[in-house]
Amino acid sequence: MFNNFQEFFNIIPIIIIAAGIVVSLLIEMYSKKSESILPWFSILLFLAAGLHALYYVGDVSVVLQNMLATGGTVNIFYSIFTFGAAIVCLLSIDYLKKYGIYYGEYYIILQSSVLGMMFMAGAKDLFMIFLGLELMSISFYILAGMNRKKLNANEASLKYFLLGAFATGFIVYGIALIYGSAHTTSIDFITSNFIELTKNLLFVAGVLLFLIGFSFKIAAFPFHMWVPDVYEGSPTTVAALFSTGGKAAAFSAIIATLFALFNGPAGNLFTPYFAVISVLSMFYGSIVAIAQDNIKRMLAYSSISHAGYLAIGLAAGNHDAVAGVIFYLAAYTFMNLGAFGIISLIEGKDEKNLNINSYAGLGNRRPLLAALLAILMFALAGIPPFAGFFGKYYIFIAAIKAHLTWLAILGVISSAISVYFYLRIVVLMYFKSSDEKLAIESSNSAMLAIVFSVLVIILLGIFPGSLLDLITKFI
Amino acid sequence: MEQNSLLTYLILIPLIGSFLILLIKKEQANLIRYTALGISTLAFIVSLIIYFQFDSANSDFQFISKIQWINGLNIHYHVGIDGMSLLLVLLTTFLTPLTLISSWSSIENKVKEFTFFFLMLEVGMLGVFISLDLFLFYIFWEAMLIPMYFIIGIWGGKERVYAAIKFFIYTMFGSLLMLVAIIWLAVYAIGPLGYFTTDIVELYKVAPQIPMNTQIWMFLAFALSFAIKVPLFPLHTWLPDAHVQAPTAGSVILAGVLLKMGTYGLLRFNLPLFPEASVLAAPYISVLAVIGIIYGALVAMVQTDVKKLVAYSSVAHLGFVVLGIFAMTQESIQGAVIQMINHGLSTGALFLLVGIIYERTHTREISDYGGIAKLVPIFSFALMFASLSSVGLPGLNGFVGEFLILLGSFQSPILNSWWYTVFATSGVIFAAVYLLWMYQRVVFGPVTSQKLVGLKDMNGREIFVLAPIFIFIVWIGIYPSTFLKVSDKSSAKVVKQIYNPVKVSSVQLGLNEPSK
């Protein structure tokens, strides 16, 4: 299986998670204290895998008979997924207790979803992408319905499953057509013969289906219908994972597939597609978010509009854009995890306090929490000096370099619109007061996760070079 | 390159100071106030050191510090000042401690947060004036919105939420388009320079070569952002709301410094970077400036709220500054620079005075006042003084700036018509009308309202705040060359940059490598 020890060594992050899943199953089966062991064990796994990936980021290679790439941007994606998932674990500990929905499989399925993401990010073969996608998606469907006694969680799960399966169908169909016309599923072969292959109409149809399927996964308009309902119905911590890890994984798969094409003769072939998707997503997300009163739904629409900004990068389709997209995804992961984390803390049992008016006067009642949420909202709105700003900045650079200045202009207009609904939360927290008592359970683990996320976005905002230099080294 | 860290200290003092404030317990309000005052005074002292070391015979940027920041994008932490920015830096560090003292008793609620945001605001303002890299500039420019937004939104008047959001979104919208222009410019620089750069010293060399039709778009994107901030007619509608709703300290800083960021931006970026487009746009923008002067004055005249009156007078005064900038002569630009300082002082003083009386009576309606001359003589004298300074009475500061601007615009070869000056001059007369009329209604006549009986005059602290401002008002009025000579060379440089844009090809530039 392995040609040498080095190959084995390079996929250690994957092995850690895979072995971890098996061990977790054993823990869950044989230990009565699994509820207190599993979350910390998962965090340990995620941190080990993430830190290993970061430390050996320079070991760029292709392993497992040209199936999987390791090192470089792939490892950076690994660390985004694993650190993100570790934060989700921290948030989940008390959240699951609050709802009384601890089931052993929660953390195990969380781990498998991360394993799926890792396969997608490193894929060198369309089958690998499909394998990872299915592993991730099926785990997600289960996670969405984790609160099995609740009606809208079941609805979310079923809706996510039906629409997700439909989208996966597109992707499989696309892969089948690509295979039929190119006689291979090797991404390298396909990208190096791309121009020739496009002469075959079946191939073009296959690529289009593939992209449409992934547009669904990144939550871009017009393939976004599932997003608000699924975010609203799923447990908040799970929604946090969907909006960050899930989105990042889908983008990583697109990058894994298309990266070799960028800066090549076929680079701008996809520009019209992604440009249209991005404009629609940005504006639809930003405008509809204004009308939301449920904060989870608001963040769902915000997630759609962020998919739009990221799609600007794909439309620009140059190496700067790829670096920008990866940076943006890293920043977005921490911003959104922090925001969802705070929501999960404030959220009372039975879905209480999800209305944004529950946040009125939070600045007086919970100053630290309010300050953190305010920073996260400014960051999501793309206001310097937080990481969200630099992500946008870099993507706009890529767009302007690709002569898509108009797209960058539309991007900033949409950002200006989105400022309104992010600020709405800040306005409520600081400029309004409320007599209503808000019983917020305190959770040290969740606070740790939130404070960590905020620190990351501040540091990434002030020293973006730290991550950016790492990314650009491999692009 | 020789590094000079003084400017960095200048930013770090309020930045570190604001975090120190967070460490103090919120019950110790006085300790917080004294600490903040100490920090901002320290910043003022550092800026004075900079002033005394500044070489006004040199037109280049001084006190430069350039440190690699984001490698991949060739972005530097690059700061430095010339005469224009020095004056504005001094204005900022001068007004900040004074406004902190002025809010000693008016801000009772959440003192800790207030001082934190206030010092953060100072960081942002100073950063804007000393940045020599567009990226760095943009970060300060935008980041500064956050503290101001909170200051208006938390400590403001009844309609504060509306005013805060309006202020934020208006400014944000303008600056985001500027962001696109900044990136476009940096990408454009790859052509002639061979590398991506947002360093304005380098962009000064390449930007004027941008073909005219693109240059106009660049010019507009920058100008829109700055014009909103100034605010230039018809983009001024956020200003009265923000001013009226903001607490006194917020209004003083808003009028005193924040608005200057717009005119500073026009001078620092628009004119030198896009000289041809600036010349082309000059008549149009000057027309808007003149309309602003007259419109601001007329609207100020009919205000019943003193604070709104002062707010609209800002629109008129800043119209003068913009006219001075776009008349593009040495005199008019010097006038514009000195008028920025003047406006900061006299309008700052007016807002302080409105705040002082409001604190006592809780009304700003002119009709609620009358005959307070006998009740509060010191206040009445101070209000007279500040009003006359704002009107532009010879011997006080306002006259110097307005005179230079009018003189410059009269001779301007770019505007090439004396109509601008004629209409702008009418603004001076209107200013006398609305300010003195307001003064008459508030101060003279019989005491109309029973509420005013027993009104207390200014206390020592309030006199202490206004006295230094008045000293400078007289100083600039009598001996302006102390200040004019500071910015003399840098204004001359801007004029030179407009008329002789450095046209260099990439060969002449020698395609130098990005400094590492």
Image (tube, coloured by chain):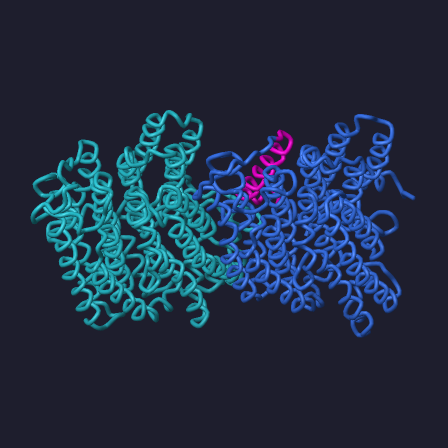
Please identify the quadrant where the N terminus of chain B is shown: top left
Q: Which chain is blue?
A: A
Horizontal arrangement in the rendering, residue A247 relative to residue B252 (left or right): right
Q: Residue A460, located in which quarter of the rendered image? A: top right
**Residue B291 higher or lower than A376, as above or below:** below
Q: Is residue B268 magenta?
A: no
Q: In this orientation, which residue lies closer to the viewer: A297 or B352?
A: A297
**Residue A72 higher or lower than B110, as above or below:** below
Q: Give x and y (percent) for residue A462.
A: 52, 42
Q: Is residue A449 magenta?
A: yes
Horizontal arrangement in the rendering, residue A324 relative to residue A4 (left or right): left
Q: Residue B402, located in which quarter of the rendered image? A: bottom left
**Residue A124 higher or lower than B211, as above or below:** above
Res B80 seen here: no
Name the colour assigned to chain B in the rendering: cyan
Q: Give x and y (percent) for residue B469.
A: 20, 41
Main secondary structure along the magenta-highlighted residues: helix
Q: Give x and y (percent) for residue B82.
A: 32, 48
Residue at x 31%, y 63% (from the top left corner)? B233
Res A138 seen here: yes
Residue at x 57%, y 66% (from the top left corner)? A403
Magenta span: A443-467
